Image (tube, helix red, strand yellow):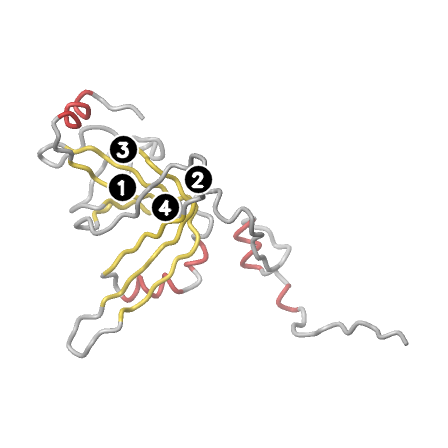
Amino acid sequence: MTFNDSELEALDSGVVRLGVFFRLETDPVVRLWLGFGDIAPGINAYDVDGAVYRGLGELQNVPAINQLINGAAERVEFVMSGVSGEVLQISQGDDAEAIQGARADVGIGLMGQDWGLLGSLHWMASYVADILSGQQQPARPGDPIVRLVSLSAGTRFTRRRRPSLSYFTEQDQKRRFPGDRACDLVTNYAHGFNKTWPVFS
């Protein structure tokens, strides 16, 4: 990771202003940052044409990021609160499964006194998206409803020992190999039959 002169000067000043950036490689790509307003950080390692990152408001919570050096594989959870009912429905529908296996990246940008970026984004961690889920917090009468969406992700070493469960369904096959029609007729097969092992006397 290299820093330009302005960034090094900001780091030496003792007062560091950081912007935290999140990128989820779906179609279309989800680009968010934990700050106010939209920001265009320019060309970086993942956005070769430049892109706009949408602001989410105040920094609430970012999971701790560790480097895997002779340690355990890391899992993190990204949580967004205050989402609309539509977003909550998306997180609980079929679209939630579409993000499994998508690349999720977290990075930082060093900012000046005017909260403008001093240089390019510095990507700190890369994860594989796993489970997208949503919930609605129970509210007392008169309290506002709070909806949460969470994305669980892990490093590529997470769950290496456990074989992934797989079904031969059309949806699973198309997630693994888009356009493959090998499992299109799987639903026509009968379910719930147990083959009885013959008893020899």
User: What label sits on residue 121 in the rendered view?
Assistant: 3
Labelled pair 2, 1 in contact (Cβ < 8 Å): no
Q: What residue is rendered at 21% in x and 52% in y?
A: 60
Between label 2 and label 1, give the one nearer the viewer: 2
Q: CA distance from mark 1 to mark 3?
A: 8 Å
Q: CA distance from mark 2 to mark 4?
A: 25 Å
User: What label sits on residue 71 in the rendered view?
Assistant: 2
At label 4, the amino acid type is Leu
At label 1, the amino acid type is Phe
Sequence-wise, which precedes: disc 3 or disc 2? Answer: 2
User: Which residue position is annotated with label 1?
Assistant: 21
Labelled pair 3, 2 in contact (Cβ < 8 Å): no
| Residue 102 as seen in the image, left or right of residue 199 | left
Sequence-wise, which precedes: disc 2 or disc 1? Answer: 1
SS at badge 1? strand
Labelled pair 1, 3 in contact (Cβ < 8 Å): yes
